[in-house]
Image (spheres, helix red, strand yellow):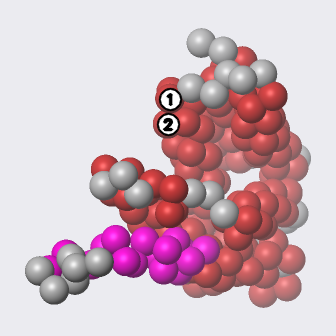
Amino acid sequence: MNLPNVLTLIRVALIPVLVLVWLTPFQYAGELAAFVFVIAALTDWLDGWLARRLSQESAFGAFLDPVADKLMVAAALVLLVDAFDSVLVTLSAIVIIGREIVVSALREWMSEIGQRGHVAVSWLGKVKTATQMLAITVCLALPIEQTLTHPGLWILVVAALLTLWSMGSYLKAAWPHLLPVTKDSAVD
């Protein structure tokens, strides 16, 4: 067990804290939930940076880090879908969570055929993640009064669009490896 992996485990442990804080009926629950989410997001950045900086990258960390990220984002999105009662929030959450499932499965399959490098994290994936984190933080922190004028909603919609774009780029990169090999296509 190393420090980057401990930070990732802390992120997983923060998920029930986020849910409990959000669901507790007190005046600053949203702001505190946003703070917990930001701390979790910062551990995501810090654990990766430390793993590279301290040469403590591990197979366990490579597995757990994306799982922790997806669990935290999915938990927050489920809370927001319930709180906002908005088609745009619901569709954005479905797109974001659905993309994570598709890309995770794609990466797993590409890894099995020795082509994992074709679907490695890209700059677009990093921009998508940063936009998602910002959108979720704003949605948690600001009171939900007028859904259509809530800035977090529109940032979330942008995050969902970036999510689709990024999924498309991963599928495009993987496409040649998704096609079945036939006798005619096997000739180089």
Residue identifier under label 2: 63
Snapshot quadrant of residue 187: bottom left
Vertical position of residue 125 compared to residue 44: above or below: below
Snapshot quadrant of residue 83: bottom right
**Residue shown at 81% from the left, 28% from the top:** 53
- Residue 98 at what x, y percent from top left? 46, 68
**Residue shown at 70% from the left, 70% from the top:** 124
Q: Is residue 158 visible?
A: yes
Tell me the quadrant of the picture where the N terminus can be found.
Answer: top right
Q: Is residue 132 left or right of residue 13?
A: right
**Residue shown at 68% from the left, 22% from the top:** 56
The residues bearing labels 2 and 1 have C-alpha atoms spaced at a distance of: 6 Å
Q: Amino acid at mark 2?
A: Phe
Label 1 residue SS: helix
Specify whether residue 177 is painted magenta.
yes
Vertical position of residue 3 compared to residue 79: above or below: above
What range of the chain is rendered magenta?
166-182
